[in-house]
Structures are given as structure tokens and as C-alpha cells.
Amino acid sequence: MSLVLDPATQDLLFREARTANTFTDEQVTEEQIRAIYDLVKYGPTAFNQTPLRIVLVRSPEARERLVKHMGGGNRPKTATAPLVAILAADNEFHEELPHLFPAFPDAKDAFFSERPVRERNASMNAALQAAYFIIGVRAAGLAAGPMSGFDPAGVQKEFLDGDHTPLMVVNIGKPGADAWFPRSPRLSYEDVVTTV
Amino acid sequence: MSLVLDPATQDLLFREARTANTFTDEQVTEEQIRAIYDLVKYGPTAFNQTPLRIVLVRSPEARERLVKHMGGGNRPKTATAPLVAILAADNEFHEELPHLFPAFPDAKDAFFSERPVRERNASMNAALQAAYFIIGVRAAGLAAGPMSGFDPAGVQKEFLDGDHTPLMVVNIGKPGADAWFPRSPRLSYEDVVTTV
């Protein structure tokens, strides 16, 4: 056995975990999201940028505003999931770097003075953190339903500002009836990995 | 307790796991990398794009070619890690979509006929998979040392082709002496999460 992770946890986080398309009406609590964040905040990012920002869409009024920016196939899921999170990248993350990266307090000015550089870094590193967040949702015994099918400009205007770029919207809850599509195939090791 | 993941596994994957800067000389086997891939290949991506491609740099000759493209501070680590992996995004991932996303075989032409769209999707979704890979390395009881400090054009020319964009380079092995820098601070829940 090459993994030290036990098989039940492999199933919980990867093998049996699936993108849920329906949910029960069991609520997702503030405590659960705090516990998820308190775990996944440790995932590594370049220069400890940690540019991920999370908007929890809890009120019926906000939910309605979000649903109208989702792609047609995603609307029923987003309308009915117990909790929906907008994951965004903070393109002004460098303001926090003197605190976040004490090993090199000048990194803010030395590397990140240009906005396009920050945008590239923010989207890349927030995507890493989005993946950690999905793993964290599963670590809480919940199913995640990450979606890229939405109008980014609409979501940005409605819920964020010009410095925050939406990356994905994630439905969160306990899987409901017929929650899963059939598992799609994966590429083989030989298709993905080469050795030089 | 809001997480179902047991505390020892929380430590293994997130809390105690750290970016290693030195390594023992214990080898990282083909079997370990196969086990890691066989676990993390299930992590979700949009349309099951799975654009991550991995180049394992095993030969001394290839290692030497890679080290010269790394930033100065990363060279000693990359020169001495038991194994180094180049993680790249396949910008032509859409060629695999009819196989990978059987639910909608026309997705290849309907959504991904334009190269800039593919590049954005490939880098975003390969970044998600890079994070799953880092978690997988830890699930194998190994330390990962992900690095963004390298010359992307140089690494691309040396090890990839025009259709593959390097995302990060990851040192992999058992942590050696003085492997860790002090843990940098993380943002608080209140700094990251808002509720609407």
C-alpha cells in the first residue's frame, strides 16, 4: 500500500466523493463552514498569498439574485442547495503580504506592484485554495457541487467589487435523491504522466 | 466536532503538513506516484476536463536542465529533492472531452473551439488538480514543495511544447533536517468569509 491515508478517508475525500446535483434540506451551519475554513486555510499558496475570498449566500433575497446569473442547468441546483458559496480571488491580496509573508515583507512591492501580475497570481492561487475548500467540504461529511457555469460579470457586479474576480460557485449540503450523474472516466496514468 | 475527518488525518493533509525545503535521500517510487495519481484523478474539474499533465524529472541530466530554469533560491531544493515533478496544463484538453465527458459529447465544439477559452479553462482546472496532487503527495506520507519561482518559457521550451503551459514545479520526498520555515500566519475567518 503506497498511501498512508486509510481507505475510508480515500473514499470520503476522493473515490466515493462526487459532485452532488440534489440535496436534502438539512442546513449547513456556520460552525461547519468555520471548521472547514480552519482546516483548509493551511493549504499552501505562493508567497502565502491566500487570495481566496468566500461569499456565503444565505438569505433568500441574495439566493434569488445569484440564481439569475447561473447557467440554465445550474439554476435548480443553486436554488435548492442548503448553502451556496461564491469563491472569488482578491486581486489586491498584496496588501496583506507584509503580514502574511513575514519572511520577506518587501514581496508586496518587489513582486506584486503590477496589477496584471497580481491577477494571474490571484486566480492561480485562489484556484488552489478552491480545491482545498472542496476537499474541506468533503472532510465535513458534506457534498460539494462546484460550478463554473455562470455569468462572471453579473456575479461580480452583484456580490463583489472590481478587485474581486469570481472563480466558481459551490453548492454545499447533504446529497439528496438521485444526487449523482454516472462517474465520468478518468485519463490513465500513462496518458497524464511522462518521465524524463 | 464539525469535521468527520479524524484529527490525525487533518494533521497529515493540512495542519501539520508543510512545504518542505530539505529532503532525505529516500527515493520516491513509481508505485507511490501511481498511487497518488490513482487517488487524486477523481478530484472534480469543470466538464471533467482534467487538463493536468505531469512530467517526472528523474534522470540526472533532466534534473540539471530543470535546475537552470529555477529561481536562485529554489535551485538547491530542486537539485537535491528525491523527485521533482513539473505540473502543466494541456491547452488542447478538449480533444479528450468526447471520451471524458460522455454526458455531452459535443462540449468540445460547443464550448471549447477557441484557444483563449481553452487556455483559461486549462489553467484554472489544472490548478485545481495541482492542489489535489499536493494533497495526494501528503496522503502518501511524503512532503511536497510546490514552487512558482521559475522561468515558465524556459521550462516550457525544455520539457513541454506549445500546447502545454507549466503551472508549478513540485519537490517531493521525505522531509530532511531543518525542512521547515516557521509557519506563516493565515487570515482569520472574518477576513475571508462574508455572508449575504
Image: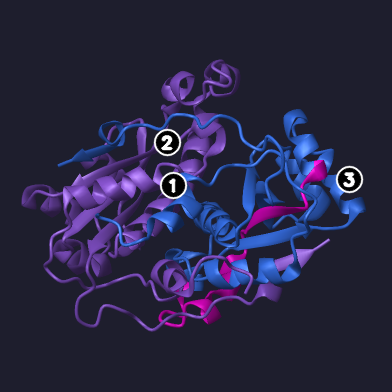
Chain colours: A blue, B purple
Quadrant of the rendered image containing residue B146: bottom left
Question: Which mark sits nearer the N-terminus, 2 or 1?
Answer: 2
Q: Which chain carries label 1?
A: B
- For the C terminus of chain B, which image quadrant? bottom right
Q: Which chain carries label 2?
A: B
Residue type at mark 2?
Answer: Pro
- For marks 2 and 1, give the CA distance: 8 Å
CB contact under 8 Å: marks 3 and 1: no
Q: Which chain carries label 3?
A: A
- Give the Cα separation between the discs numbered 3 and 2: 33 Å
- Magenta residues span A79-107
Residue type at mark 1? Gln
Q: In which quarter of the image is the N terminus of chain B?
A: bottom right
- Examine the structure image and report whether residue A104 is included in the region drawn in magenta: yes
Residue, x 75% and y 39% (percent of image)?
A77
> Dot 2 corresponds to which residue?
B51
* Separation (CA) of disc 3 from disc 1: 31 Å
